[in-house]
DNA sequence: CCACTGATTGACAGCGCTGTCATTCAATGA
DNA sequence: TCATTGAATGACAGCGCTGTCAATCAGTGG
């Protein structure tokens, strides 16, 4: 015990000395290089173990070794969508020995820029970002950084490097067409904070386009400037229906949380689904599908987006080249609520 | 353009040269030290901006500067509980300029140990971990690492350094007492994968203890070895009730997801709540409270756990000393389902 | 027996930054 | 006028590791 310089951590030098080899050989041994003799390997491993050696990757990365950190910037963790994406990312990265370094932008371009600067200063191996209105400075940093960058969620805009996601405008449009084909004519909308959530806005835009195609217009629209939640959907539908005038025959919600709230309102108010009122959401969350009457919705492949984005980073790092755009698509889920 | 060595990033040296000061002065200026003259500060900032300089924190941290990374190890992201905790963590850390570096252990002590080793090798400023049966090696690394470590969720076991959480055993016990006081006598349980989720197991244990206190035993018990979900809760209750014999008057679910599934089963099967059957859950999720009939449950303060844990790390880093154990408590939510 | 080959190992020089001290210099008071 | 002080700046020496290239050495064929 007295031999140790108290709290200082053992370095590679000490491991090497103990194993009777040079630093670089110890380094190679511990990194699993296949040029070291089995005996050397064992000596080094034993030395490291007995010293309680812990590799310092800061030094390694600085000296030119690879980093196994991947920056991840998401706008929020409150919306279940992003934990789902993160799960996909984490899962794929973990298997390759990488770690996500997380930053939350709160849908704010300024914070986002700050995060990019911060995360890049750790020289990560790659960056995954769900953009929230990137500034010019943000774009400049990303394109100048010389690392794989994946913009996720959306594929409606041109990415700096790569993009993985789906067309939200397309999803809204598809849902409108589907519902109109099923005979609905008085279609209304209940949504959450659209000013910040531009993907929800894109869906609404697509939905409207679908109505226009069929010569229709929105038969009612309530948007509340709060984050989406079940309670908000419930309240939103309540407000919409109180509005007097001919009631809609269907309500498209900004997402499933909101839609489930709508379903609950109907249950509580004795409105029968889908005869009196039909409901559609977006995301394909488990909760919606486990409802007594399954929710009509669009399944977004959130975890797949994460997995695919991670895959792009890893692929690029291993030298392969990758698609600039990956559309993971979406699928209509015909439930019982419409 | 030709002046630049093509893709090599500008270093502090170049910034300093351009500003006509020494490296260390440039360093101080960019780090916001208050010993540099305003003029010097401006010169350096201009030089940095015009060069597109991006600080390299790898080098900084290696040279003895502080790290702003905090390792975070969670067992899963599928269970909404952990994103909630992560949200609290992230929020507090972000405000202090820190970033969580994430690892998911999948409830596996071996993976957990691997993650600890990996994350510590980046020399983070602190570590937050929701333990999943830490190995001796894990404990050894944590106690030898000389950084603030917070074990979260549970406070039923003795931590290496600090702990923030609640007593799950206590929560189960409190719920049992509450329900028994309300007159329920035939109490059953429906749960998910308890083998891996030892916190759910602890709640069940506490619940049982409460029954024993009152001279009762569990009037039925279904546990399914799958991750918790609404669908699983629905299925679980269905199985429990098919079991023949006298039906229970209340079912305690392993968490709110499961309990909501139970509520849905009742709705679909025409079982009236809470007359024919009462239901209780755990967590206090938004969805349960927005149900047509609000769920009786125990609110766990998940985000608060994250915030508090982050607070402990930050406090310790700033030299203050911190409580070894922080109990964030829980609160009974008396809904309409019991 | 010797040049030659391939497999291991090692010496060296940094990676880019910051802590620690030392230095400079103008302002202050005696 | 000169010693004294404090503010601003700088020189230096690493932090711990890995890429690059050179050296070593046993085994091989001529």
Image (cartoon, coloured by chain):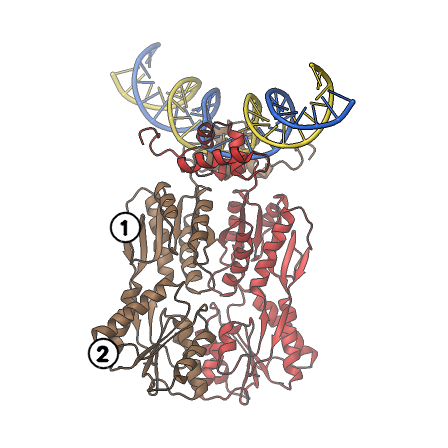
Chain colours: A red, B brown, C yellow, D blue
Query: Where does label 1 land, which residue?
Result: B324
Nearer the observer, A252 or B151 = B151
In the shown orientation, is residue B134 left or right of residue A285? left
x 68%, y 35%: residue:
B1
Which subunit holds the residue at mark 2? B
Q: Tell me residue A94's x, y (percent).
A: 52, 52
Which subunit holds the residue at mark 1? B
Up the image or down, B316 lies above or below B156; here it is: above
Nearer the observer, A192 or A65 = A65
Quadrant of image for the C terminus of chain A: bottom right
Quadrant of image for the N terminus of chain A: top left
- Sort mark 1 into few (<14), some (14-19) or many (20+) by Cα contacts within 10 Å: some
> Gap in Å between the C-alphas at discs 2 and 1?
34 Å
Regarding residue B125, the answer to whether it shows in the image is yes
Nearer the observer, A109 or A327 = A327
Tell me which numbered mark, 2 or 1, is placed earlier along the sequence. Answer: 2
Regarding residue B99, the answer to whether it shows in the image is no
x 32%, y 48%: residue:
B160
Q: Tell me residue B271's x, y (percent).
A: 40, 87
In the shown orientation, is residue A177 left or right of residue B186? right
Q: Tell me residue B220's x, y (percent).
A: 34, 79
Q: Secondary structure at mark 2?
A: helix
Q: Tell me residue B102's x, y (percent).
A: 47, 52
Q: Secondary structure at mark 1?
A: loop
Q: Which mark is residue B181?
A: 2
Q: Which mark is residue B112?
A: none
């Amino acid at each position: 015990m007295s031999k140790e310089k108290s709290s200082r951590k053992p370095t590679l030098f000490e491991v090497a000395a103990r194993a009777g080899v040079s630093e670089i050989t110890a380094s190679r041994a511990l990194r699993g290089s296949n040029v070291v003799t089995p005996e050397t390997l064992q000596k080094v491993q034993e030395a490291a173990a007995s010293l309680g050696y812990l590799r310092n990757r800061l030094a390694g990365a600085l000296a030119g070794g690879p980093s196994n950190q991947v920056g991840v910037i998401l706008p929020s963790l409150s919306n279940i969508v992003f934990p789902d994406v993160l799960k996909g990312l984490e899962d794929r990265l973990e298997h390759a020995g990488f770690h996500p370094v997380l930053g939350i932008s709160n849908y704010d371009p300024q914070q986002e820029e700050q995060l990019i600067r911060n995360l890049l200063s750790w020289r990560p191996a790659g960056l995954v970002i769900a953009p929230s209105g990137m500034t010019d400075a943000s774009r400049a940093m990303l394109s100048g950084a010389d690392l794989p960058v994946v913009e996720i969620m959306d594929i409606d805009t041109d990415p700096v490097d790569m993009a993985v996601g789906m067309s939200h405008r397309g999803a809204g449009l598809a849902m409108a067409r589907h519902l109109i084909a099923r005979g609905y004519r008085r279609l209304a909308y209940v949504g959450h904070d659209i000013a910040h959530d531009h993907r929800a806005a894109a869906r609404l835009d697509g939905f409207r386009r679908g109505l226009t195609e069929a010569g229709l217009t929105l038969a009612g629209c309530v948007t509340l400037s709060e984050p989406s939640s079940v309670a908000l959907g419930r309240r939103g539908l309540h407000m919409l229906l109180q509005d007097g005038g001919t009631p809609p025959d269907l309500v498209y919600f900004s997402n499933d949380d909101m839609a489930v709230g709508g379903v609950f309102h109907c249950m509580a108010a004795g409105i029968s689904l889908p005869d009196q009122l039909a409901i559609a959401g977006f995301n394909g969350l488990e909760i919606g599908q486990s409802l007594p009457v399954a929710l009509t919705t669009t399944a977004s492949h959130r975890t797949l987006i994460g997995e695919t984005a991670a895959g792009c980073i890893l692929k690029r790092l291993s030298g392969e080249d990758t698609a600039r755009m990956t559309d993971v698509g979406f699928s209509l889920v015909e439930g019982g609520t419409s």
